[in-house]
């Protein structure tokens, strides 16, 4: 059956996760909008979560899924704090690019 | 579909479009979680990521009124894009090489983590995950709840302090 031969294997999942991670890295490096950079960081976290779940199934170990659970919780907290910081910065300025943020410069 | 959404996040000029592409990717990852018998994590993925986090992104985009089109043509730093392409392709190469060299570990494929708990029916994955979280990692679980409280309080403080200063 074709569907069996095309059934995704663990290697397929891990390669997909690596590609997602690389795309997220590229986005963080290139995009200048802090919101989009945050989205790319979420992308990278999801790639890692996908590889964790794949390895949890392959290695027959539930702890991988436990770690993914904790990663999700911490990612939610991180997004909340990050967006709060972005909101509090952007209230006082009109532009929204990461290049303009130099408040901490001495 | 997942890769389409991921590419959409980084190439769409409009931040709202990027957020919607992110939804596509997150749903795709949730589907892959279901396919890998991680049912609880798939539900959490849809609720937390595709629900809460993306709505939060869209809310901030609308709130700040920053839904302007970003100009992707101009390159802000010299040679930034080629360097970024090189770095991400190198990262991809390193990851795939590690995968190829380590793939022998994956061949000892187990019977699947759900099989010992099949008598629990459809809840097998959730039951196993709960046993792991609430027995072995209960301290970490409590610490993450404290972390969430700190994050909420800190965000309220961050945004509120600024409002007072603006008055």
Image: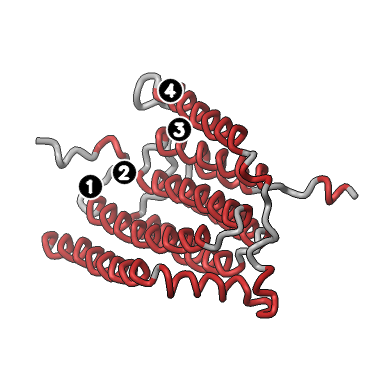
Mark 1 Cα shell of 10 Å, populated few (<14), some (14-19), many (≥20): few
Question: Mark 1 = which residue?
Answer: A93
Which residue is label 3 attached to? B72
Q: Position of residue A65 (x, y in %)?
A: 52, 61
Where residue B128 appears, x then y in whole percent? 56, 72
Q: Are there few (<14), some (14-19), or many (20+) residues within 10 Å of tag 3?
A: few
Q: Residue at x 87, y 47 (%)?
A: A2
- Letter of the chain that mark 2 sits on in the rendering: A
Q: Of the numbered discs in the image, which one, if any, rests on residue A2?
A: none
> Percent x, y for residue B165?
11, 60
Structural distance between the alpha carbons of marks 1 and 4? 30 Å
Labels 4 and 2 in the same subunit:
no
Task: Say which mark, if any, is on residue B83.
Answer: 4
Disc 1, SS: loop
Mark 2–mark 1 CB contact (< 8 Å): yes
Say above or below: B159 vs A46: below
Residue assigned mark 2? A96
Residue at 50% over, 66% down: B51
At horizontal 64% and vertical 39% (from top left) the residue drawn is: B104
């Amino acid at each position: 059956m074709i569907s069996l031969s095309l059934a995704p294997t663990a290697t397929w999942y891990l390669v997909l996760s690596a590609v997602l991670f690389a795309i997220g890295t590229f986005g963080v490096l290139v995009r200048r909008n802090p919101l989009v950079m945050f989205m790319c960081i979420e992308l990278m976290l999801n790639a890692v979560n996908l590889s964790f779940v794949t390895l949890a199934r392959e290695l027959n170990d539930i702890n991988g899924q436990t770690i993914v659970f904790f990663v999700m919780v911490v990612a939610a907290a991180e997004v909340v704090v990050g967006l709060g910081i972005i909101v509090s910065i952007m209230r006082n300025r009109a532009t929204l690019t990461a290049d303009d943020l130099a408040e901490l410069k001495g | 579909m997942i890769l389409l959404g991921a590419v959409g996040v980084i190439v769409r000029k409009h931040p709202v479009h990027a957020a919607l592409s992110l939804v596509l990717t997150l749903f795709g990852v949730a589907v892959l979680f279901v396919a890998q018998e991680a049912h609880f994590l798939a539900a959490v993925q849809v609720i937390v990521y595709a629900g809460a986090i993306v709505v939060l992104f869209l809310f901030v985009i609308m709130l700040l009124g920053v839904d302007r089109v970003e100009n992707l043509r101009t390159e802000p730093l010299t040679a930034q894009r080629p360097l970024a392409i090189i770095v991400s392709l190198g990262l991809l190469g390193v990851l795939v090489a590690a995968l190829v060299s380590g793939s022998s570990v994956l061949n000892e494929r187990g019977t699947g983590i759900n099989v010992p708990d099949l008598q629990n029916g459809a809840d097998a994955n959730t039951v196993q995950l709960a046993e792991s979280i609430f027995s072995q990692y209960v301290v970490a679980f409590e610490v993450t709840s404290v972390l969430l409280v700190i994050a909420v309080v800190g965000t309220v403080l961050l945004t509120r302090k600024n409002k007072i200063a603006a008055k």
